[in-house]
Amino acid sequence: MLGPPDPGTSLEQLFEESRDAVFIADPGQDRILDANAAASRLLGYTREEFKVTPISRIHPHELPRMREFLDGALRDGINWTIEMACRTKSGTFLPTEIELLALNIGNRVYVISLVRDRSEHRG
């Protein structure tokens, strides 16, 4: 079992060293604000490319479902988990499981997403 992080561990270290792909996004602006190294490995974009790649490019066929997902997370104030395909930089679609936390800060919605590859779980 993991204990609490060392007192000297920063949030940035936790973000960077997560084995899960982690995204911080502004869905109202269709923008990814930041992504960790695991996100780069998962989808093939560099960190800088993520910052200029719209969320809608990664989820082109599931935007209405994503909006419903966000609305539910905001309304209920809990984390939601959903299976959804993500388009990689190469254009292939990768089945993923996304755990999403939506935060309302200063009249804007921000999203923290943990994304896991689910392709090995397909039958």
Image (cartoon, rainbow, N blue to C red):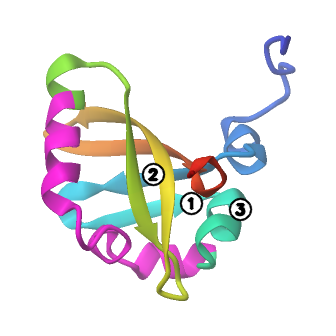
* Residue 53 counted in the magenta span: yes
Residue 65: in magenta span: yes
> What residue is disc 2 on?
24
Q: What stretch of residues is rendered in magenta?
A: 47-72
Asked if marks 2 and 1 touch (Cβ < 8 Å), the reply is yes
Find residue 37 and name its label. 3
Looking at the image, is 58 positioned above or below residue 89?
Answer: above
Q: CA distance from mark 2 to mark 1?
A: 6 Å
Q: What SS does tag 3 mark?
A: helix
Mark 1 and mark 3 residues within 8 Å of each other at the beta carbon:
no
Residue 41 lies left or right of residue 47; in this view the side is: right
Return the x and y of residue 109 as percentages of the image width and height.
22, 43
Three-letter code, disc 3: Ala
- How many C-alpha atoms fall within 10 Å of the one at disc 2: few (<14), some, or many (≥20)? many
Residue 80: name its quadrant: top left
Q: Are marks 2 and 3 in contact (CB under 8 Å)?
A: no
Numbered disc 2: secondary structure: strand
Tell me, for residue 35, which label it has, or none.
1
Front residue of 60/104: it is: 60
